[in-house]
Amino acid sequence: MNAYTNLKIKCELFGIRKKGYIEDILETVGLEGVGKKKTKHFSLGMKQRLGIGLALVGGEPDLLVLDEPINGLDPQGIAEVRDTIQRLRDERNMTILISSHILEELSKIATDYGIIHNGSLLQELTSEELMKRCSERIEIELIHPEQAVPILDRMGFTNYQVTDKSHIHIFERLNESANVNMELAKAGILVNGISITSEELETYFLNLTGGNQNA
Amino acid sequence: MLNMIKMDLYRMVRTKSMYVVWIVMAAAIFFSTSMSKLDIDTMNKEAEQQQTESIAETVKPETINMGMSVFLPTQPGEKVTVFDQVYANLQAKFVALFLVIFTVLFSSADIGSGYIKNIGGQVRSRRNLIFSKASVLFVYTTVTMLLYFIIQIIAQQMYFGYLEWGNGSELLRYFGIQILLHYALVLISMAIAVVLNSNVFSMTIVICLCMNTMIVLYGVINHLIQKAGVENFQILKYTVTGKIALLSMSPTNKECLTAVVIAAAFGIVVTLLTAWVFRKRDI
């Protein structure tokens, strides 16, 4: 059977007979040009999009849940599914919940993240927060980071964060790490280490879930 | 529920294998009728030469052998009626074979392809999906049997050159009861396909059912029950396949009622069992 027939079967189940309904869904998922091509000849990406189309039949869902939608897809397939998801978000104002391990792809479309490990939600954060945590920064390692705060304020730094008991991350003026080191030394604050660093999403995830032995 | 039936009907109509099975069935019926013509001609010649009584008496077989035997109940010198041909093919489960083959394919198609996951979670009760399939298979059984009847008439005219109907009212009564019995067999096939969830095993079992391979098991059961004191017990008389084979051309009211009860009992029990299994299963 072709894509149209697959959708038609589900439309029959819901008693949907509106003209052009199936064509609209095919257009939304980017399968309007497949004609009578049988689904067994579809690429995996096309099948995934048809699956998304089938999920749309039966009403205007406010929430779409996709379980590993891009697993096993080639780059073109991933791009096609990503475009479909973005179109659904933009045109139909739909909330889409995606479960995936492919973090780099998620970073291109997700607005909010929930990191789950062993059935527990470890962290919930927005895309901006996640990017901030993973972006390039000056990382300063010292014994009492709170002592460095007045120095950084005096130097005019505003975008920094005391991340834990021994680290400060500065997210601006990355070329001034030497000046920061000098000012801290002048103030008598011992610095154990200072470097420009960033964190990949994968590393962030693995560190959070305790899997950093695999990082 | 009505929408589900419409959905399954639409799916059935769009399934290529249904038409393929019908085409093969038509070819098989033409072949079977041509073979019957040869048999009858041979029998008539022998009867003329030997002027002996025919060994092919009006048949009311009491025992069924393994395999598929299509034999006409016509006496030498008599004209072969449409009723004779219909009786010969139906009691041999020749038509049933084509019914059950498509039933297995249709019943397992949406499960095997994974399409059931798209709809299983969105219906109020999963049992209704089975009842919907059962309803659509009734339509399929009836249409196929009627199609067979039409093809048989055409084949009869083609090979014999004449159309003798036989006893019209008895033909209708016999045909109607056989439709019910064949439908019960179709429901049994659906149950096997859904419960076993394996096309290979399901297809093998239903074909074996049509080939009377169960008589081996029936023989063991008969022996055990006779040992328990029930004399002359024949389980075959109380099964759907047995009734299809043993139903006479002129069934009495009691025979008709027994056949209908057996068809209904088997049909209802296997459908309910299938619905229960499907509801419990993780799809």
Image (cartoon, coloured by chain):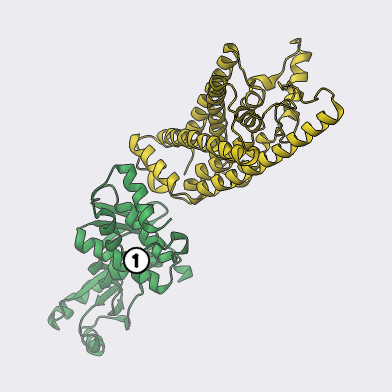
**In this rendering, position of residue A25 left or right of residue B125:** left
Residue in the picture at 38% in, 66% down: A205
Q: Residue at x 51, y 48 (%)?
A: B19
Label 1: state its secondary structure: helix
**Residue A9 coordinates in the image, percent (x, y):** 37, 48
Instruction: Answer with the quarter of the image where residue B68 lies.
Output: top right
Q: Could you tell whether A177 is left or right of B251 in the image?
A: left
Residue A167 x/y as whole percent: 29, 73
| Horizontal side of residue A73 vs A17, given as left or right | right
How many numbered circles does the render carry?
A: 1
The reply to whether residue A204 is in sight is: no
Q: Is residue B119 left or right of residue A182?
A: right
Q: Nearer the viewer, residue B111 or A8?
A: A8
Can you say whether A213 is above or below B19 in the image? below
Q: Among the chains, which one is green?
A: A
Give the quadrant of residue B157: top right
Please, what is the three-letter code of the amino acid marked with disc 1?
Val
Write down the chain letter for disc 1.
Answer: A
Residue farthest to the right? B50
Label 1, residues with CA under 10 Å away: few <14, some 14-19, many ≥20: many
Residue assigned mark 1: A81
Image quarter (top left, top right, bottom left or bottom right) of the N terminus of chain B: top left
Image coordinates for residue A29, horizontal then vertical, percent: 30, 62
The picture places residue B113, in percent across and down from the top left corner, at 48, 51
Q: Is residue B33 visible?
A: yes
Front position in the image: B136 or A107 = B136
* Chain identifier, colour yellow: B
Name the residue rendered at 75%, 36% in the picture: B41
**Residue B92, relative to residue A81: is it above or below?**
above
